Image (spheres, grey):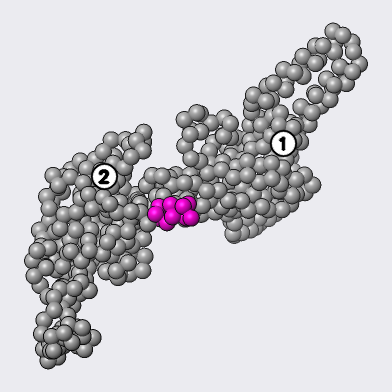
């Protein structure tokens, strides 16, 4: 007995280095993290009206063939039953080999179309995928609720994806409302080959689409009407400057540049005359936006007062960019503060900030005190109702009435194309 214990102890001691060496080897190996696979939420078979009608007819054929013992009915019943089985098995195997990826969606603007791009890959070696429908929803369009069918949803169709190949397809979504659209699930479906059973596969693909506010082409006079900071429009009209707006004609003075001499008026009067221009627009513009909290406008297709104010702020930012004027945005109620600058992408940053504003935000119910403004910036207060918040010192008030009579350039060009 003692001899057995001694032999067992020696064997255990000899195995310890092997176990410790194996443990050291496993811990020293780098852990490679694989790319997380796309999560398949559901694979479903759906019945639709055409499929239900086909099944009812098949059952009636079966009952008739049994009652009549007619060979022809038995043959027709067998063919109908076989078609049903083939429709389920073949298309089910076809859908198991499909993978879908959505490429990043670029921001779009209200009135434009957002473009979606998808890549559908067939991993099967021999079985092609036929008649594939794709939709940004958790189920095929035929199974959506009636209210969901009425709203615009990105959809695409591909007729065939050969075995082992990849197809790129595109979808278009009309952008009707500003805001952030969250994308979650993609459903691919088919009724191939006989249209009896609807098969679908739903995968998760989280992403978001930012719809920028509507931008109209404002006249340059909107910014030219605001000169230096704290100066009213009347005070500005009485000041000469180096702007682009014509002011008056006066007698020539030594030192006046030759390009400003009014030659026609000089020829008529017999002496040199010089053109004068009004004081130029400010070197920087600060758009100060004040909003009031609104109810849920999901059932209203018309633009609310808040949406019109956001549209006006976006149009001012676009106008400043077009005139090479540094622009900034401030929404004190929401903590948005973009300092005036001509840096690349500053206008895009302002439009994206305006697109993310939620008019149901509780913070919009509070009235904030006007903040300080840069000394060299002209402040434009944009608000639908003058009573929403106090006006900053020296700021010019702009209301959505400025948009009255201004035609959206994109809509005007589309209507002109339609007429032509």
Mark 2, other Cα within 10 Å: few <14 / some 14–19 / many ≥20:
many
Is 207 on the left-hand or right-hand side of 52?
Answer: left
* Image coordinates for residue 92, horizontal then vertical, percent: 71, 35
Above/below status of 132 relative to 320: above
For the view shown, which residue lies furthest in the top direction?
Answer: 67
Q: Position of residue 154 (x, y in %)?
A: 53, 44
The residue at the far front in this view is: 268
Secondary-structure class at tag 2: helix
- SS for tag 1? loop
The prevailing secondary structure element of the residues shown in magenta is helix
Q: Give the residue furthest to the right.
A: 71
The answer to if 70 sits in the magenta stretch is no
- The span picked out in magenta is 410-420
Q: Going 30% across and 51% down the picture, which residue do you hit?
A: 311
Asked whether residue 288 is in view, the answer is: yes
The number of discs equals: 2
Quadrant in the rendering for residue 306: top left
Is 412 one of the magenta-colored residues?
A: yes
- Label drawn at residue 306: 2
Name the residue rendered at 50%, 28% in the picture.
Answer: 146
Are there few (<14), some (14-19), or many (20+) residues within 10 Å of tag 1? many
Spatial CA distance of label 1 from label 2 is 48 Å
Q: Residue at the spot x=63%, y=44% of the render?
A: 157
Please report whichever mark, 1 or 2, sits nearer to the chain's N-terminal start.
Answer: 1
Residue in view at x 74 percent, y 49 percent: 162
Residue that label 1 marks: 192
């Amino acid at each position: 007995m003692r001899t057995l214990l001694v032999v067992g102890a020696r064997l255990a001691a000899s195995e310890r280095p092997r176990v410790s060496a194996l443990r050291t080897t496993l811990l020293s190996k780098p852990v490679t993290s694989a790319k997380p696979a796309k999560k398949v939420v559901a694979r479903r078979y759906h019945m639709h009206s055409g499929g239900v009608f086909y099944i009812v007819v098949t059952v009636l054929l079966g009952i008739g063939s049994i009652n009549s013992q007619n060979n022809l009915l038995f043959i027709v019943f067998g063919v109908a039953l076989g078609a049903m089985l083939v429709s389920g098995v073949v298309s089910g195997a076809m859908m198991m080999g499909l993978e879908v990826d959505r490429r990043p969606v670029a921001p779009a603007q209200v009135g434009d179309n957002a473009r979606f791009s998808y890549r559908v890959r067939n991993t099967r070696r021999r079985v092609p995928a036929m008649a594939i429908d794709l939709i940004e929803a958790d189920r095929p369009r035929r199974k959506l609720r009636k209210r969901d069918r009425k709203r615009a949803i990105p959809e695409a169709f591909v007729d065939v994806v050969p075995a082992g190949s990849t197809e790129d397809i595109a979808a278009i979504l009309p952008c009707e409302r500003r805001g952030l659209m969250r994308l979650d699930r993609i459903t691919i479906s088919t009724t191939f080959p006989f249209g009896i059973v609807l098969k679908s596969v739903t995968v998760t693909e989280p992403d978001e689409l930012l719809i920028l506010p509507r931008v109209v082409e404002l006249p340059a006079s909107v910014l030219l009407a605001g000169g230096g900071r704290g100066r009213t429009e009347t005070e500005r009209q009485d000041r000469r400057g180096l702007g682009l707006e014509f002011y008056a004609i006066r007698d020539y003075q030594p030192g006046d540049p030759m390009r400003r001499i009014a030659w026609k008026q000089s020829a008529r009067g017999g002496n040199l005359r010089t053109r004068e221009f009004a004081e130029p627009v400010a070197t920087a513009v600060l758009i100060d936006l004040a909003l009031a909290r609104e109810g849920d406008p999901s059932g209203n297709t018309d633009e609310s007062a808040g949406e019109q104010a956001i549209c006006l702020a976006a149009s001012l930012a676009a106008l400043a960019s077009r005139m090479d004027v540094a622009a900034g945005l401030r929404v004190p109620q929401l903590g948005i503060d973009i300092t005036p600058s001509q840096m690349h992408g500053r206008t895009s940053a302002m439009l994206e900030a305006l697109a993310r504003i939620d008019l149901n935000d509780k913070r919009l119910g509070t009235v904030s005190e006007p903040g300080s403004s840069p000394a060299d910036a002209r402040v434009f207060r944009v608000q639908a109702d003058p009573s929403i918040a106090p006006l900053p010192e020296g700021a010019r008030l702009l209301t959505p009435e400025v948009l009255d009579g201004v035609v959206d350039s994109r809509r005007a060009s589309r209507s002109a194309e339609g007429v032509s």
